[in-house]
Amino acid sequence: MCPQPFPIPQKRELPPVLGWLTTVVSLTVLLTSAFGGQLRIEYYGLRTPGDTGDIEQASGLHHGRLGQREGLWVVCDRNGGQSAGRLYFIAEATLQKAVHRQAVVADEVFTPVLEETAWPALNAAHRDAGEEVLAELRRRLRAGIEGNGGPRLDLEAVTIGPSPIAPHEPRLFVVAEEPHSTVLELSLEGTPARARLTGVYTYPEASDAQGTDSNDGLEGLAYAGELGRFFWAEEGTKFHDGPPGPRLFFLDPRLGVAVLKPGRVEVAREPSAALTAAVRSLREGRMQTLNGMTRTPDGGLAVVDRNGGWILRIDPHRKRAEKWLNLYDLDGTNLRQTLANFPGLRLMPYISIEGIAMDPAGTLWLVDDPAMPESFRASCLIRIRGLDSLKR
């Protein structure tokens, strides 16, 4: 959960005129989707396999292929009810049949697992992750498998890449953020498939850069195209008036590149400092935070500044950043207004996008992670086509 940056309105029914305006906005989006040549925005509910319930608190998104599976991969944070700490796969064929304002039903769900007998070998191979990190990870995996009421994994990002460890087979990499920022390597095995834990990599977050609940660490991850090399994004925390005062969320985000070594995330300091400086130079207003990232077909990055209301475009080679898409003015569409009643009445004063993905066709996918004071936790999937129609 995150603190609200603006006063929260009291819950109330929409006046008739606002309900009418919301309908007009929705019809406009739908009509725009039906005709080419413009930005086309569609949105969907997200349901678990078998249409048994909502996918809640989706906080990470990736479009990619792993073996025979190609489509969207979604992860959920620790507050997602039955979705907490789980990973969902939505096949490309399912996405092609998606209908605007209706539900997309995921094809598969995975809960990260590791047999008790396999822990000694994992501990030995990834001892640099630290005993505390490994013990807490073991506890949360057990809670996810047994459903014993304990804390679940706090999954915040997902990507696909080859394992840093020989024979370098393709793997899923997910971020588990709280209480320790770690990257987990998962192998899909068996029929039906399970997500077996094969690697643990601890991110070196300084103690004075952590928020009070250690829930502001890694939020974005993307394979950088070289073995073991990944781009990462951190929300970022800063002292309000200098130490030892209170630390505030969402003031000093970080963006960088790192190499995964057994047990640890080894940050490349100079390029990471340059990328971070480029991002922070774009901050306007009271907050800036990074909550998701994706590679773009041109080799760049698209990164979500959720609280700032922007999707940033990053050139990682030139260490440059620019504002790209305004979440409150997407070619005239304000996502906050468009989704005012989807999937329920929204009270948050901003749109809480936490996942972003781009497919090979250049279609942009977003997913939101609703927070208090919303009465619902069901996430919304957004598809944006026609980005080439925007002026550069």
Image (cartoon, rainbow, N blue to C red):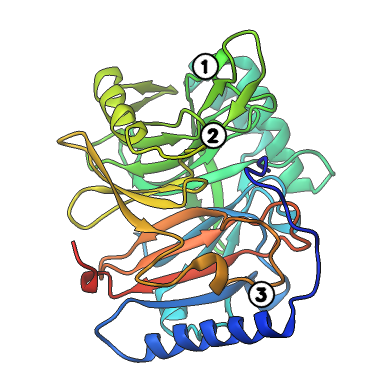
- In the rendered view, tell whether residue 65 sits above or below residue 141: below
- In the rendered view, tell whether residue 269 sits above or below residue 158: above
- In the rendered view, tell whether residue 117 sits above or below residue 39: above
Query: Can residue 61 be seen?
Result: no
Residue under label 3, please give it.
341
User: Hey, which quadrant is residue 150 in on the image?
Assistant: top right
In the picture, the disc for residue 334 is none
Give the camera-side residue of 151 and 129. 151
Q: Is residue 52 left or right of residue 186?
A: right
**Label 3 secondary element:** loop
Q: How many C-alpha atoms fall within 10 Å of the one at disc 3: few (<14), some, or many (≥20)?
A: some
> x, y (%) of residue 384?
38, 71
- Assign the N terminus to one quadrant of the image: top right
> x, y (%) of residue 242?
57, 11
Please, what is the three-letter code of the amino acid marked with disc 1?
Arg
> x, y (%) of residue 386?
28, 75
In the picture, the disc for residue 250 is 2
Residue under label 1, please give it.
127
- Assign the C terminus to one quadrant of the image: bottom left
Q: Is residue 303 left or right of residue 197?
A: left
**Label 2 secondary element:** loop
Q: How many C-alpha atoms fall within 10 Å of the one at disc 1: few (<14), some, or many (≥20)?
A: some
Estimate the spatial distance between the alpha carbons at disc 3 and disc 2, rounded to whole Å: 27 Å
> x, y (%) of residue 20?
64, 87
Q: Is residue 175 left or right of residue 347?
A: left
